[in-house]
Image: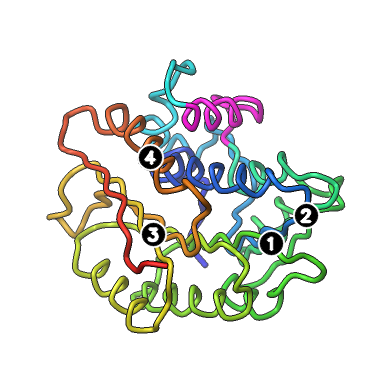
């Protein structure tokens, strides 16, 4: 519970994760029926990039700080940059709860979970005027069994973005994906993970295959080859039951982000099926 996302907001991993999340949400918005989003590790919702925490690490400078203006580019990139600009960027960076809440229609709902007491309190204040947003100070993994399946809604997204503070986090994440698929088979699951070196990621993917899960797509963005396990060399987003054309859109978005986030040419993007439908 020591993790505070304020130190990392707006970095390259946020850009990758939130850009892909927004693509998924746009698919959900195409149908009139309501949907529910469960955000298991919400943080405090919005971050001041001039704060002591953000300035201490400066991670945002190599992330959103490299996009001082909205460039011409693919729709997926422009949509993401336009959305965060509308919510306060570049001075403030909106976390996943703010991005999701900004898109909700009257028939949609957002459930936010945050274990850190101070961040949970801030998150609750940020959404006190939005009746469609529920904030819970609790463990995000435990929230899966508490809130799935969503009451009265048959569609949705489970966003799992753990802090990776514990040594068994990949195993816990694999269990969470399995639980989500079992309790809410109509939902899309998007699970973020860090890439320091390849061995834990290979084991993570293998555990999901061994569990018999279907329709798994993995998206990864590397700033450099993952040969130094002491560094955050990249990150991934594992998507279960991705929407139609998501694979193509993910490739387009990450290809547009890569040359800006990894300008030295050592980075790479990979979109691949872990398990077919």
Q: Please, is residue 128 above or below residue 262 in the view? A: below
Is label 1 or label 4 in front?
A: 1
Q: Earlier in the sequence, mark 4 or mark 2?
A: 4
Residue 109's tag is none
Q: Earlier in the sequence, mark 1 or mark 2?
A: 2
Query: Residue tagged by mark 2?
Result: 34
Residue 12's tag is 4
Kind of element beneath mark 4: helix
Please say whether residue 85 is one of the residues in the magenta stretch: yes
Q: Please, is residue 163 above or below residue 261 in the view? A: below
Q: Earlier in the sequence, mark 1 or mark 3?
A: 1
Please say whether residue 208 is one of the residues in the magenta stretch: no
Residue 33 position within the rendered picture, expressed as x and y whole percent measured from the top left: 78, 54
**Marks 1 & 2, CB-CB < 8 Å contact:** yes
Q: Please, is residue 240 above or below residue 96 in the view? A: below
Kind of element beneath mark 1: loop
Q: Earlier in the sequence, mark 4 or mark 3?
A: 4
Residue at x 73% of width, y 66% of height = 154
Distance of mark 1 from mark 2, alpha carbons?
7 Å
* Quadrant including the C terminus: bottom left
Residue 217's tag is 3
């Amino acid at each position: 519970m020591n993790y505070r996302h304020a130190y990392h907001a707006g970095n390259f991993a946020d850009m990758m994760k939130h850009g892909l999340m927004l693509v998924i949400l746009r698919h959900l918005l195409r149908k009139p029926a309501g949907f529910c989003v469960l955000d298991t590790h919400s943080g405090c919702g919005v971050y001041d990039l001039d704060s002591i925490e953000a300035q201490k690490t400066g991670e945002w400078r190599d992330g959103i700080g490299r996009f001082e203006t909205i460039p011409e580019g693919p729709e997926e990139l422009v949509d993401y940059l336009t959305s965060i600009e509308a919510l306060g960027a570049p001075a403030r960076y909106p976390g996943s709860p703010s991005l999701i809440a900004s898109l909700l229609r009257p028939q949609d709902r957002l459930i936010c979970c945050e274990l850190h007491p101070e961040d949970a309190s801030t998150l609750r204040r940020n959404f006190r005027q939005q009746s469609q947003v529920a904030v819970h100070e609790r463990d995000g993994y435990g929230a899966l069994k508490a809130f799935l399946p969503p009451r009265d809604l048959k569609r949705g997204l489970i966003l799992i973005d753990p802090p990776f503070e514990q040594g068994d986090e990949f195993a816990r994440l694999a269990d969470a994906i399995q639980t989500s698929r079992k309790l809410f088979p109509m939902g899309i699951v998007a699970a973020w993970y860090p890439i320091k070196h390849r061995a834990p990621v290979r084991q993570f993917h293998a555990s999901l295959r061994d569990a018999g899960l279907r329709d798994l797509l993995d998206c990864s963005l590397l700033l450099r080859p993952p040969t130094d396990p002491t560094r955050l060399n990249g990150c991934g987003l594992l998507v279960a039951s991705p929407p139609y054309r998501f694979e193509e859109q993910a490739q387009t978005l990450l290809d547009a982000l890569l040359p800006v986030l990894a300008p030295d040419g050592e980075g790479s993007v990979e979109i691949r099926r872990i398990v077919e439908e």
